[in-house]
Amino acid sequence: MKQNTTILIVDDDDEIRQLIQLYLQNEGYRIFHATNGREALGLAERHPVDLIILDLMMPEMDGMQACIRLREKFQMPIIMLTAKTGDMDKIQGLSIGADDYVTKPFNPLELVARIKAHLRRFLHFSPAEKQNDVLHIQHVTIRLSTRQVYVNDKEVFLTPKEFDILVLLGKNLGIVFSSEQIYQQVWHEPMTTSNNTIMVHIRKIREKIELDPKQPIIIQTVWGVGYRVQPLWHNQ
């Protein structure tokens, strides 16, 4: 499967691109690379890409701008790679559609492990998920196998993490999940960042699927506890 899995490395630093490429090619992945966001957009439009490693600070079009543009068309995981370490920088990156945030200097083996985890969740589904491929949540339809979401029959585009959060809540109707539980279920690791990570993702999901994001009827906040989806839905 790896030889058919394509990763796009976007960084204006030649040494970093070559280092990441070396480790990923040793794992059997197919690699494209770009030196700025504009090149990355062109490559993503011309070739199927399964995951993007996206540097934040680049000429012509930086990582933030590129991420916003990519999310208008694509759902593949995006891992931000940057020297900025502040919480607000991470929150901003996650809020515009990035799925993970790796700071420089980084351990290449850790980056490879994160890439594998994101690809595993993005590309694979369990037999049970395939048997129950469609979820209906009021005016929202979710197709699990293709990771597509429709609001009143019009497709909307969620990031991989947004999609996974919506499916987690949608499959467990009425159950309240804390921010920590959502993070552990979706990221598959203990929560080490602030609750803002989940809050930002929930807000972005609501903006895309709620008829009125300011008065959400699908994803509800249980104050002081967490989030839940109202049980007014059924499987097709």
Image (cartoon, helix red, strand yellow):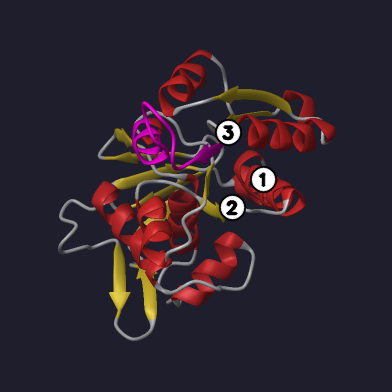
Q: Left or right: where does residue 107 sit relative to residue 186?
A: right
Across and down, in percent, residue 86 comes to: 43, 64
Q: Left or right: where does residue 236 sit relative to residue 215?
A: right
Q: Is residue 21 magenta?
A: no
Label 2: which secondary element: loop
Label 3: which secondary element: loop
Q: Amino acid at mark 3?
A: Asp
Q: Which residue is mark 2?
A: 104
Instruction: Out of 187 and 107, give the one closest to the viewer.
Output: 107
* Quarter that holds the C terminus: top left
Instruction: Out of 109 and 162, give the one closest to the viewer.
Output: 109
Q: Amino acid at mark 2?
A: Lys
Q: Which residue is mark 1?
A: 115
Nearest-to-viewer mark from 1 and 2: 2
Q: Give, as a single range, the part of the protein colored magenta.
A: 52-69
- Separation of residues labelled 1 and 2 (CA atoms): 16 Å
Across and down, in percent, residue 96 comes to: 35, 47
The disc placed on residue 13 is 3
Residue at x 28%, y 49% (from the top left corner): 209
Q: Is residue 65 magenta?
A: yes
Label 1: which secondary element: helix
Any part of residue 1 in sight? no
Say which label, 3 or 1, has the lower sequence index.
3
Q: Residues within 10 Å of mark 1 (few under 14, many from 20)?
A: many
The disc placed on residue 164 is none
Q: Compared with residue 176, is residue 27 higher up or lower down, i.e. above or below?
A: above
Residue at x 60%, y 24% (from the top left corner): 33
Q: Compared with residue 207, is residue 73 higher up or lower down, i.e. above or below?
A: above
